[in-house]
Image (cartoon, rainbow, N blue to C red):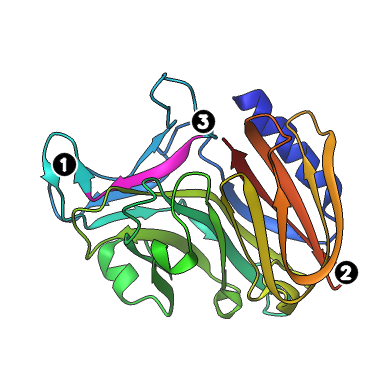
Amino acid sequence: MKKITLTLAAIAAAITMNAQTTYFSDDFNDEDVSDWTLIDEDGDGINWSAVQIVDEEDQPVGTPVLRSASWNSVLGPLTPDNYAFSMPIDLSSEDGTNDITLSWDVAAADAGYTDENYTVYVATGNTVADAMSATVSFNELVSDNGAGGLENFYTKTLDITSLAGQVVYVAFRHHDVSDQFTMEIDNVEVVAGSLAVDNTSFESFNHYVANNVLTLKANTAINNARLYNILGQQVISKKLGTQSADINLNALNSGVYLVQVEIEGQSKSFKIVKK
């Protein structure tokens, strides 16, 4: 799994042309969250954890993720109030000239139970009180993005340029929900650069996979889309020129793929899972 991760990371680096500085990145593929501060505020003993999800045949599904639950097969419905704070992220060298963007992928594992509520805080400390006083935050239901299921991770971005010059912590809070199932976070990054990932070209960009079809949607025309397998081989290339496009994945083997999308000369990369 680590070899797969390294290969995909190398592909992403090779196809990304924008000049950026990455201040923080965690894909949880080492299943180690010892550098995160985890707070079980509701006190039920069940908190965020890094896990490799497996199917009914005990085969890995995608790559490891950060997971929190609102339902448990032993305890039944849960009422989580779980916080996961990143390690300190030093933005002191930034003066606000560059865009600074936080990005992450989010999913709800069970396609029938996707109303998982979560909030992202960017704070100057790693306590609950710090999160509550954060000047930058974002809240949504996972279901706000579209179809659920582990094949449908949604890439989200948050502009944190206002925090340039400070040391910050990214916090994910799973709360105010019960009796759904689980939510998953992956590929957390903080990036600075004049062409950061929240460039207006990708402001409303969305993607999801359903019934072996990758759907891409944007407010402006998508120029092209390319898919790469874990060996770095290009397996699909499509010239589009439309704001919405469907790409059939039936010919591909099951597994993890890297997708590169180009809009208005800017590119964005993300992972998908083909079942």
Instruction: Indicate the position of residue 197 as horizontal and vertical percent values.
Output: 70, 66
Residue annotated with mark 3: 30
Find the distance from the CA under tag 2 to the CA under tag 1.
Answer: 48 Å
Q: Which amino acid type is shown beneath numbered disc 2?
A: Gly
Q: Nearer the viewer, residue 160 or 238?
A: 238
From what the image shows, is residue 275 above or below residue 170? above
Type of secondary structure dominating the magenta stretch: strand
> Which of the pair 49/126 is nearer the observer?
49
Q: Residue at x 59, y 24 (%)?
A: 1
Instruction: State whether residue 8 is above or below residue 152.
Output: above
Instruction: Check residue 265 in the rendering and tell me which mark sits there, or answer none.
Output: 2
- 33 lies left or right of 158: left
Describe the element under mark 1 as helix, strand or loop: loop
* Quadrant housing the C terminus: top right
Q: Please state the extent of the stretch shown in magenta in the rendering.
A: 64-70
Residue highlighted by disc 1: 45
Q: Is residue 106 left or right of residue 194?
A: left
Distance Cα–Cα, label 3 vs label 1 = 23 Å
